[in-house]
Amino acid sequence: MENDPALPSLNQEPELLKTVLNKEGFRFTSQRQKILDLFQSAALGHHLNAEEIHQQLLDQGEKISFSTIYRALHVMVQLGLLQELELAEGRKYYELNTPFMDQHHHLVCVHCGDVQEFEDAKMTQVGSSESAARGFSLLNCQFTVYGICPSCQSLLG
Amino acid sequence: MENDPALPSLNQEPELLKTVLNKEGFRFTSQRQKILDLFQSAALGHHLNAEEIHQQLLDQGEKISFSTIYRALHVMVQLGLLQELELAEGRKYYELNTPFMDQHHHLVCVHCGDVQEFEDAKMTQVGSSESAARGFSLLNCQFTVYGICPSCQSLLG
DNA sequence: TGAATAGCGAAAATGATTTTCAATAACCCT
DNA sequence: AGGGTTATTGAAAATCATTTTCGCTATTCA
């Protein structure tokens, strides 16, 4: 639960996004702020895809194009603000990037698509020892467990 | 229609694919055999995507359509013969499914795309305890570590 | 403030995968 | 074995998520 100095914490400062963007030569825009706001107002670790972002902004009266959404997501991944997730759904999900300490992983029901999160320090241990052993510099680890959730099990008999 | 918990080993029997297919109401075809052969002649744990399969079959003089390839891959994943991998490359990879014991995981260089494999029993342990804790029936686990490989590190200075 | 240019939206383009449909070939039954 | 049923095939068109193009607007910084 500690702030990593390398990873900017945007929780309090409304101005920080601008600082982080400008430091790398990107510009601050209201669209980027609104997208980041969605992630910050959602439960920590909640993941969103481009379509959901588009819909949620529409719902709150903000018109935005998909190209802008995708461009913003890429920039924020590059800046380390967001993390891209592959959940075997044919599209990409994003969530607020968290320091390695509380990195969490996913348990996916392949039948109904339900996704649950969990944490386990062993993942990070294994990830860092494996990457160290091969001289890789570690960026992040994703552990995804596929299975069938209890309610789908009863549905399927 | 669901994954058979008993994972058939096709290493020896050339006839086994037919048996496995027919048991679930699918038909045996030469195309499906040829695709499976590719995986069996490759190094164990080597992953292929639809394009590579198409190309390799062309190279050995076999004409096959992409629709057939994708259909065959889906069927074989359903039957538990193959496993689908998400390697954050915008497309799906497949490899021979192996029993949990020697399930392996991936270390991906986000710069050059190089993929290395490793094994660690801790993964399966965590995967099964997490899924058990939530009542999920476990199908498989994928642990993917992203980083930058040594040669890309020196390139990037 | 104003010039330079990153970012925007709309629409067209892309690339992987999926579906459609008529022709073919596996499977099952006698 | 022969024949009917129907899953599978190939080719082309369709989808779906994502990316790019391009003319216009807005942000940054001197």
Image: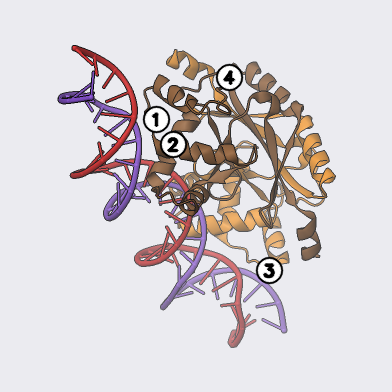
Chain colours: A orange, B brown, C red, D purple
Amino acid type at image mark 1: Phe
The image shows a total of numbered marks equal to: 4
Report whether mark 1 lies on the same chain as mark 4: yes
Judge whether D26 appears above or below A6 on screen: below
Amino acid type at image mark 4: Phe
Q: CA distance from mark 3 to mark 1?
A: 57 Å
Q: CA distance from mark 1 to mark 2?
A: 7 Å
Amino acid type at image mark 3: Gly
Disc 3: host chain: A
Question: Counting residues from the N terminus, which is met first, the one under dot 1 or under dot 4?
Answer: 1
Residue under circle 1? B28
Residue under circle 3? A25
Examine the rendering and report whether any part of residue A117 can be seen: yes
Name the residue at 76% across, 50% down. Answer: A7
Check if mark 1's residue and mark 2's residue have beta carbons within 8 Å: yes
Disc 2: host chain: B
Name the residue at 58% across, 42% down. Answer: B86
Q: Tell which tag, 1 or 4, sits nearer the viewer.
A: 1
Q: Which mark is residue B32?
A: 2
Residue under circle 4? B136
Check if mark 4's residue and mark 3's residue have beta carbons within 8 Å: no
The foreground one among A60 and B1 is B1
Q: Tell which tag, 3 or 2, sits nearer the viewer.
A: 2
In the image, residue B136 lies at what x, y percent? 58, 19
The answer to which quarter of the image holds residue C2 is: bottom right
Q: Tell which tag, 4 or 2, sits nearer the viewer.
A: 2
Name the residue at 55% across, 27% down. Answer: B10
